[in-house]
Every structure is written in structure tokens, then in C-alpha cells.
Image: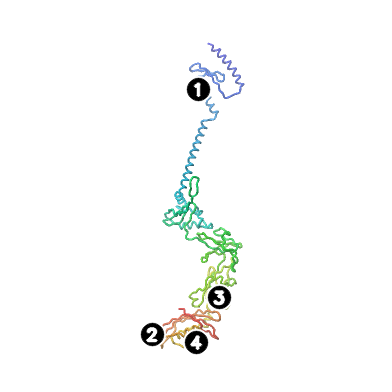
């Protein structure tokens, strides 16, 4: 056998190649040649070098070299796996989004579904902010959420809530009414619009059932800043501009509507801001305090030295029990005055006497009828005698000559008394007067005055026939020559 020679040749060749390999560049290629010698031993040439290895060693070395080779390159299987999972996830997500979009479109394509959703979201438990944001058809932009919340809470009440369709014939609009225990308190609307695949319905408007929507005027100095619930009014709210009053001066009138609660109205002029009070009789808020002057006619009214004419007259010809007795009327003036100027109200009678009228509260001035105690002291007995003479004449207990001492001849009242047909049984065994009063002595124009006289006139015709005649009259006196005579008389009965 030439085993040794072969080994030498192989060794020589291997050594020669080893020198070449040492000088050659290193690469990743592993050159393996296997020469099987026996069942359990193999000669292996690795890059020109011969090694004798057993099968087990060969397997271990081969596995190690293969693992090193796998680690040195990208893991293609892992990339394929990640890419596949990502693609599958994207497909599933796309299907989910498609189903979700179509489900949303399906729900919105049914007005019943949308209405039920709106009811649950906004009315089962009142969502005041959402409702207020959509409540624009009736409620002003000047209204506050607090006022809206307070009103709707009270109007809705507590109890079982439900809703039903009350749609009109309007195409593309569905209306629903909301109830608490069968009592309606609000309505809402759905509006149809074009969708991507089919028409959809949207919550578009709400309106509470209002008992009263407030609308009113605001009177403020010209050019002033006016605020409603803290929001400044612009020129669009001006109803009349540049008006002028002898008392208030130049002023503007604003009109505001659509408020459901009591607003806070403010006006700022000349650096001063003031809160305005509401005048229910005129349905307005005024920056100018308003005088209500209730005076007796025949008197002249002055405010801050300015005579008030009938352009400020609110009511005339007012009668009370007192003015009826005095044959007088009352009249009421309504007078706005300056933004800052306090009022000084006075009256002057025809005789020229001026008297200040006091404020009874909130600029309400009432002229009390002031009676003259001096007249009463001087003419009380004359007034009583005149009234009793009239009573005696009507019971046939005095003469016309006595009547003429107190009543001015030629007057209407004198002629009425003189021509009266009196039927009364005489003679009388006794007569007298009880509960006699004389009051309300009131000076009048042209040297005249009036007073009230009351008494009971008792007349006894026999011992068993007793008559009582009550008398309540107002006598009107005027000076004739050197004395006062009755020129008129009215009964207060």
C-alpha cells in the first residue's frame, strides 16, 4: 500500500496550497472534501487541509458552521412572517372601518334611530348646554345659559319623559315633541342632508315651549353704551335714535326681544354705569328715572323749575270719592328726567302759591289735597247754617227769605231749591240736628272755596212719628259783595 507516499503528496500539496491561502484574501466560502476511510472515520480536507474526524465530530462541526452562516445573513423567514401579519391586520382593520362606517350611515339614514339617540342624549337627562346651543329660533343671543337652564328645568318638571313624531309636510324635516308625564315642554327637529352613500338625518334645532318671550324697549342717553346680560348692544337694536325731551335731553330707544328670563340691563354714560329698572306699565327699561306725578287739575306742575305741559300727560279725568265730593279731577303725568339729575317736583295753584310735593317712593309723587284750617275757623258756622237752612226749607220749616241769606239768587242751585215741590205733613212738634260736621275747606280760584257738611236731621211730627233725614253735601262758596254765598251744592250720598 502506498499510504505514506499518498500522505506525503497530500501533505505537500496541502502545504503548498496553505501558503497560497495565507496570501489570498479571506472570503466566506468554506471548501469541504470528504474521503470516507471507514465506517466511523473520515478524512476531510477543509480548504486544503486534511483532518481525520469521526462522524459525531463531523456533524457537530457542520452544524456549528451552518449556524454561523445563518446568523451572518438576514432572517428571511422572520421578514416574511412580519409582513404577512401586518398585511392581515390591515385587511381586518379595513373591514372593521368599512363595517363601522356603513353601520353609522345606516343608523343616520333612519330618522327614528337619530331621534331616539337625540332623546337619550339631550332630553332624558336635560343637556342644557347642547340644547341652548341649538335654541336659536326663539331665544335671543343676549340670553344667558343660567336663565335658559332655570326656565327649562321648571318647564320640564320631573317625571317620566318620552317623545313622539309630530312631523309636518315639509320634506327633509322631521319634528318631534318631548313630554313629561304627557305634558309637552319642548320640540326638536331633524334635517335630512345628502350623505356619501345615502341621505342622513341630523339634529338641527330645538325649541322649548315658552309661555312668554319677553320683548321690551330700553331708553338711554344718546351715544351711551347699553348692555343686556353683560353684552353690549350694537346699532342693529336701535329703534329710534336722536330723540329729544325737555327733561331727559337727547336719547335713543332700543328694542330687545327673545329673552325668557329677567335680564340685567345697564347703561353707561359719562363714565357712570347704572342698572336700569323695569317699568311694567310701559314695558321698558329706562336710564332716566321716571316721575309719576298724580296731581289735582287746576294746579300747575313743575319739575326742576320746568313747567310740565300736557305732552307728558298719562291719564286725565280721574275721579275718587274725595275728588267727586270736591268736583275735581286728578291727572297723572309721566316725566323722565336727567341721567344724574335728582328731581325737584312742585305744584302751583291758580292763586300762585307754590308747594313742594314729596316722593312717596320710587319717584311716585302724589299731590295730597291740603285743606285750609283758616277757612274752616272763619266760615265753619256759616257753612253749617247754610246746610241746615236748606234742610229746614225742604221740610217746610223755614221760608224762602231765610234761604236767600245763604244761597245766591239767580244760580242754578237756588232755582232748583226754590221750585222744588215739597209735600210734607205739618206741623212738627220738634226737630233738631245731630252728628254735625264741617270739613274739607278747600280754597279755589277766583276767590272761592268749598267745604263738606254732614249731619242727621231729626223731625218729630207727633210723639210717635219720628223721621231722620241724613245729609252729606259739599257747598261751594264765592264772594258776593262783602260776604260768601253758596253758588253750588252737590250731594255726596
In space, the residues marked 1 and 2 are separated at their CA atoms by: 162 Å
Which mark's residue is nearer the viewer, 1 or 2? 2
In space, the residues marked 2 and 4 are separated at their CA atoms by: 30 Å
Q: Where is residue 461 in the image (x, y as percent from the top left)?
A: 40, 86
Q: Position of residue 428 (x, y in %)?
A: 41, 87
Counting residues from the start of the chain, the first of labels 3 and 1 encountered is 1
List the residue tagged with mark 2: 465
Which mark's residue is nearer the viewer, 1 or 4? 4
Q: In which quarter of the image is residue 291?
A: bottom right
Q: Could you tell me if the residues under marks 3 and 2 are in contact, i.e. CB atoms within 8 Å?
A: no
Which residue corresponds to the image point at 53% horizontal and 27% vertical from the top-left?
A: 70
List the residue tagged with mark 1: 59
Counting residues from the start of the chain, the first of labels 3 and 2 encountered is 3
Q: Position of residue 34 (x, y in %)?
A: 52, 19
List the residue tagged with mark 3: 299
List the residue tagged with mark 4: 404
Q: Where is residue 276 in the image (x, y as percent from the top left)?
A: 55, 63
Q: Does dot 4 land on a helix, a strand or a loop?
A: loop
Amino acid at each position: 500500500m502506498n499510504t505514506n507516499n499518498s500522505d506525503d503528496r497530500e501533505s505537500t500539496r496541502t502545504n503548498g496550497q496553505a501558503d497560497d491561502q495565507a496570501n489570498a484574501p479571506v472570503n466566506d466560502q468554506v471548501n469541504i472534501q470528504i474521503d470516507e476511510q471507514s465506517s466511523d472515520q473520515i478524512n476531510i480536507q477543509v480548504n486544503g487541509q486534511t483532518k481525520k474526524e469521526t462522524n459525531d465530530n463531523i456533524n457537530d462541526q457542520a452544524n456549528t458552521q451552518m449556524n454561523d452562516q445563518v446568523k451572518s445573513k438576514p432572517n428571511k423567514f422572520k421578514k416574511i412572517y412580519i409582513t404577512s401579519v401586518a398585511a392581515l391586520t390591515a385587511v381586518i382593520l379595513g373591514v372593521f372601518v368599512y363595517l363601522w362606517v356603513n353601520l353609522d350611515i345606516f343608523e343616520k339614514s333612519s330618522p327614528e334611530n337619530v331621534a331616539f339617540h337625540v332623546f337619550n342624549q339631550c332630553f332624558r337627562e336635560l343637556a342644557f348646554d347642547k340644547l341652548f346651543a341649538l335654541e336659536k329660533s326663539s331665544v335671543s343671543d343676549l340670553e344667558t345659559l343660567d336663565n335658559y337652564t332655570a326656565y327649562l328645568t321648571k318647564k320640564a318638571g320631573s317625571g317620566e319623559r318620552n317623545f313622539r313624531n309630530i312631523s309636518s309636510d315639509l320634506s327633509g324635516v322631521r319634528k318631534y315633541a318631548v313630554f313629561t308625564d304627557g305634558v309637552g315642554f319642548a320640540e326638536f327637529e331633524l334635517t335630512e342632508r345628502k350623505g356619501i352613500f345615502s341621505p342622513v338625518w341630523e339634529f338641527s334645532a330645538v325649541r322649548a315651549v315658552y309661555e312668554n318671550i319677553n320683548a321690551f324697549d330700553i331708553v338711554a342717553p344718546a351715544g351711551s353704551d347699553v348692555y343686556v346680560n353683560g353684552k353690549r348692544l350694537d346699532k342693529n337694536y336701535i329703534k329710534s335714535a336722536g330723540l329729544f325731551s325737555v327733561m331727559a335731553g337727547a336719547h335713543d330707544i332700543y328694542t330687545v326681544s327673545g329673552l325668557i328670563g329677567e335680564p340685567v340691563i345697564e347703561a353707561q354714560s359719562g363714565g357712570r354705569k347704572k342698572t336700569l329698572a323695569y317699568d311694567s306699565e310701559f314695558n321698558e327699561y329706562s336710564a332716566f328715572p321716571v316721575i309719576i306725578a298724580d296731581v289735582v287739575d287746576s294746579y300747575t306742575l313743575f319739575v326742576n323749575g320746568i313747567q310740565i305741559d300736557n305732552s307728558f300727560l298719562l291719564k286725565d279725568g280721574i275721579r275718587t270719592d274725595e275728588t267727586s265730593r270736591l268736583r275735581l279731577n286728578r291727572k297723572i303725568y309721566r316725566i323722565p328726567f336727567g341721567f344724574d339729575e335728582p328731581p325737584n317736583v312742585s305744584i302751583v295753584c291758580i292763586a300762585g302759591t307754590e308747594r313742594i310735593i314729596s316722593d312717596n317712593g320710587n319717584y311716585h309723587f302724589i299731590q295730597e289735597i291740603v285743606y285750609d284750617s283758616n277757612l274752616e275757623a272763619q266760615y265753619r258756622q256759616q257753612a253749617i247754617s247754610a246746610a241746615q237752612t236748606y234742610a229746614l226749607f225742604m221740610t217746610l220749616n223755614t221760608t224762602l227769605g231765610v234761604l236767600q241769606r245763604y244761597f245766591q239768587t239767580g244760580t242754578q242751585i237756588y232755582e232748583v231749591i226754590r221750585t222744588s215741590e215739597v209735600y210734607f205733613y205739618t206741623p212738627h212738634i220738634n226737630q233738631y240736628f245731630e252728628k254735625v260736621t264741617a270739613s274739607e275747606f278747600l280754597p279755589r280760584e277766583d276767590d272761592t272755596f268749598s267745604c263738606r257738611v254732614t249731619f242727621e236731621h231729626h223731625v218729630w211730627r207727633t210723639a210717635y212719628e219720628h223721621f231722620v233725614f241724613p245729609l252729606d253735601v259739599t257747598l261751594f262758596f264765592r264772594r258776593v259783595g262783602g260776604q260768601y254765598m253758596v253758588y253750588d251744592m252737590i250731594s255726596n250720598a
